[in-house]
């Protein structure tokens, strides 16, 4: 299979000299192109830490991460920033968008950082905002959008950079169930139609059920890694 | 794009930015008005002072300024006069023969300064004719005097009355003459108004037994800015038995007064700008604190820290620049108004100025340099203050910033 993410025995220890906290403990994770995978676990189980390491935002205490065959763990900081810009789409739980930019400008911003030509940017912004159902909200600033709409802009922006995969850390945590379902619908559609790989963390039952693959984290260890059709016992 | 982002970020917290800008603007306003007034006052002071009597530069016989006696006078030399006149920046010259004397009429006697002048040349430098309140200007061959009004009053005299001038001549003999008051002068300065009298140079030379001699050669400049160059050139060109003094050297107390006042003003402005700097800085700190997560998010997405730092830098500059422009926009009409409607001082300050011999009127001046100086000062403060947020941004760790 075509591997996009290969995380090899990742560990992250905080305060190694005093009272060590194993936020992530010897985790292996392998994601193929086209996966729609959930990282499940209660609060404090290490989901954010693991996603940050996979996304090249944080450095593991042990182990390494390969993205598309590139070992990113050894990259110098400035190369890593550039790597993130071109290879990884991010959706965070909150504070995703630049408040002073409109929906359109927020999506375009990432392509400006990539120095894409204007024509391409404009076309892609329109296409993506339409795909997330916000074609009539393009010139509105985040504060005037609902939480669900904001997350949809964030998803559109994550895809705008044409990344290898999208990492979404609890994207529905601040949403009501209707908005959460709508967001998942959009992500699923983009996964199906555009073949985009998604890895999202959650402890939301409804979200877990939509994943085609579920890895369960407890106290920094993967306790289960299975197709999402099997109901998980972790709340 | 980064500039657009910075510009919009300023208006995110509209109130805070407006307050910061107004604070900067008020400081700039205050600074510009203060400096314009102060420089206006001093320019006016110097101009008055110099055109009142001394001129910008004088050439004397060596030692005359220290000891103002006829013994230190010099014999008028055409080559010297031509040299001075041909020095670049010099517009006019006039010769004077000065002597302290007793002026009396009937049983009243007063000390006074009698100045022998070339009426035409004198008028080009000190505009003597404009001070005439009664009578007419002297002619070179007149046997008459222009007497300051305070002196005539003290002697109980009027236009066309006669007074006797008594002193010691060049060769030590007693010199006395009777002159008619051909004109009465009015000076704003009590110092001149109570004690000066002008007579034609030839008459003074005859009276003092000092044919062909003068005590001072007064130099009028094309522009006040020429002073250092002209003084430098004359100091070199004049023969060894003559001395060249600028008004600053002739009246050091005025220079000191100006310097002390200017220093005091700059200290005040320094304190003002220090206060403003704290204001700008606290705005920057709040802005930094509020936006940690946003900076973390931007860096996580792939925006390099130096690009984020550039946005923050641009925000600081926009903030100070807007405040600065606001200050300039507000101060221009104020300064303009103050040039047309000078502030008139009363009370002690007025007395002090009058004792120096000046009218206590304060017209401001409009000088581009004053505006640009303040603008540059504030921008430099902005640049300096921007260093801290830039360092903070460059040290940012995305993961930690986003966890906050
Ligand atoms: N900077 C840090 N220093 C110390 N402990 C941390 C730090 N960041 C996270 N942790 C700890 O690591 C564990 C995993 O946290 P996190 O990855 O945020 O879990 P989750 O996202 O699943 O809620 C938690 O126990 C948390 O307290
Ligand atoms: Mg988390």
Image: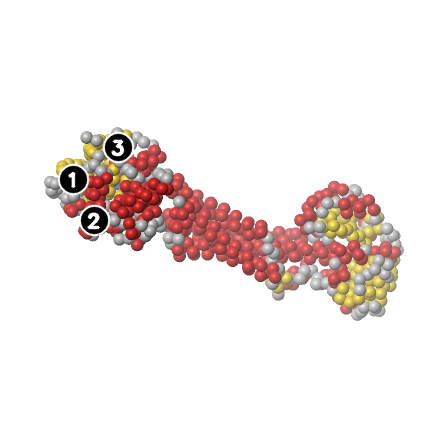
Lateral position of residue B91 relative to residue A91, left or right: right
Identify which residue, B104 or A191, lies in the foreground. Answer: A191
Quarter assignment of residue A17: top left
On residue A182, which mark appears?
A: 2
Please tell me which of labels 2 and 1 falls first in the chain.
2
Single out the mark in the foreground, 2 or 3: 2
For the residues beneath circles 2 and 1, the answer to whether they share a chain is: yes
Q: Answer whether residue A202 is visible to the viewer in this image.
A: yes
Lateral position of residue B119 relative to residue B286, left or right: right
Using the image, name the chain to which the residue with label 3 belongs. Answer: A
Q: Name the residue under label 1.
A: A212
Query: Considering the numbered disc 1 on the image, is that residue within a helix, a strand or a loop?
Result: loop
Single out the mark in the foreground, 3 or 1: 1
Q: Quarter of the image for the N terminus of chain B: give it.
A: top left
- Residue at image point 26% right, 50% down: A149
Some atom of ligand 1 lies within 8 Å of the CB belonging to the residue at label 3: no
- Height in image: B293 above or below B107? above
On residue A67, which mark appears?
A: 3
CA gap between label 2 and label 3 equals 29 Å
Quarter assignment of residue A11: top left
Residue A36: give x, y in percent of width and height.
19, 39
Query: Considering the numbered disc 3 on the image, is that residue within a helix, a strand or a loop?
Result: strand
Tally the numbered discs. 3
Residue B380: give x, y in percent of width and height.
50, 46
Query: Considering the numbered disc 2 on the image, is that residue within a helix, a strand or a loop?
Result: helix
Identify which residue, B146 or A116, lies in the foreground. Answer: A116
- Residue at image point 74% right, 45% down: B87
- Height in image: A43 above or below B121? above
- Residue at image point 73% right, 43% down: B233
- Residue at image point 69% right, 57% down: B48
């Amino acid at each position: 299979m075509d591997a996009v993410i290969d995380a090899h025995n990742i560990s992250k220890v905080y305060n190694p000299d005093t009272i060590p906290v194993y936020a992530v403990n010897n985790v292996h994770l392998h994601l193929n192109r086209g996966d729609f995978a959930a990282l499940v676990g209660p609060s404090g189980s290490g989901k954010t830490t693991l996603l940050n390491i996979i996304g090249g935002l944080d450095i593991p205490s042990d182990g390494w991460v390969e993205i598309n065959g590139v070992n990113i763990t050894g990259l110098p900081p400035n190369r890593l920033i550039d790597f993130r810009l071109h290879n990884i789409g991010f959706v965070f739980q909150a504070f995703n968008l630049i408040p002073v930019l409109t929906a359109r400008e927020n999506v375009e911003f990432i392509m400006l950082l990539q120095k894409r030509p204007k024509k391409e940017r404009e076309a892609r912004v329109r296409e993506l905002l339409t795909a997330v159902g916000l074609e009539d909200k393009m010139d509105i600033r985040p504060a005037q959008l609902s939480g669900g709409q904001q997350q949809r802009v964030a998803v559109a922006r994550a895809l705008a950079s044409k990344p290898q995969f999208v990492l979404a850390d609890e994207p529905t945590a601040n949403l009501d169930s209707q908005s959460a379902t709508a967001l998942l619908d959009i992500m699923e559609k983009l996964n199906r139609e555009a073949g985009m790989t998604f890895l999202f963390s959650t402890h939301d039952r409804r979200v877990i059920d939509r994943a085609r693959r579920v890895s369960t984290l407890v106290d920094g260890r993967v306790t289960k890694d299975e197709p999402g059709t099997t109901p998980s016992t972790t709340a | 794009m980064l500039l657009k982002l910075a510009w919009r970020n300023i208006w995110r917290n509209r109130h805070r930015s407006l307050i910061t800008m107004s604070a900067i603007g008020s400081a700039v306003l205050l600074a510009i008005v203060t400096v314009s007034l102060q420089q206006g006052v001093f320019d006016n002071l110097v101009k008055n002072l110099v055109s009142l009597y001394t001129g910008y530069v004088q050439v004397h016989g060596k030692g005359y300024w220290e000891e103002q006696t006829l013994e230190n006078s010099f014999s008028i030399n055409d080559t010297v006069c031509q040299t001075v006149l041909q020095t670049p920046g010099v517009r006019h010259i006039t010769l004077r023969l000065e002597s302290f004397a007793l002026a009396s009429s009937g049983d009243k006697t007063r000390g006074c300064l009698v100045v022998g002048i070339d009426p035409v040349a004198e008028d080009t430098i000190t505009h003597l004719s404009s001070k005439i309140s009664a009578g007419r200007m002297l002619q070179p061959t007149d046997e008459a005097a222009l007497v300051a009004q305070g002196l005539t009053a003290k002697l109980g005299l009027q236009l066309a009355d006669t007074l006797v001038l008594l002193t010691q001549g060049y060769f030590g003999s007693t010199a006395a003459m009777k002159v008619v008051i051909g004109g009465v002068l009015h000076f704003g300065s009590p110092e001149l108004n109570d004690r000066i009298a002008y007579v034609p140079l030839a008459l003074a030379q005859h009276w003092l037994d000092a044919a062909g001699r003068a005590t001072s050669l007064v130099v009028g400049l094309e522009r006040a800015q020429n002073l250092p160059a002209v003084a430098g050139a004359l100091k070199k060109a004049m023969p060894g038995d003559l001395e060249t003094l600028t008004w600053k050297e002739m009246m050091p107390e005025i220079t000191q007064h100006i310097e002390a006042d200017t220093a005091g003003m700059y200290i005040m402005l320094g304190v003002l700008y220090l206060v403003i700097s704290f204001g700008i800085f606290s705005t920057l700190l709040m802005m930094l604190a509020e936006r940690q997560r946003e900076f973390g998010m931007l860096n996580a997405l792939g925006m390099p820290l130096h690009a984020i730092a550039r946005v923050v830098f641009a925000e600081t500059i926009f903030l100070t620049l807007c405040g600065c422009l606001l200050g300039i926009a507000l101060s221009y009409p104020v300064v303009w108004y103050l040039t047309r409607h000078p502030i008139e001082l009363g009370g002690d300050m007025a007395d002090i100025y009058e004792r120096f011999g000046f009218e206590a009127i304060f017209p401001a001046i409009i000088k581009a340099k004053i505006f640009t100086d303040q603008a540059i000062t504030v921008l430099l403060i902005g640049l300096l203050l921007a260093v801290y947020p830039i360092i903070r941004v460059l040290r940012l760790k995305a993961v930690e910033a986003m966890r906050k």
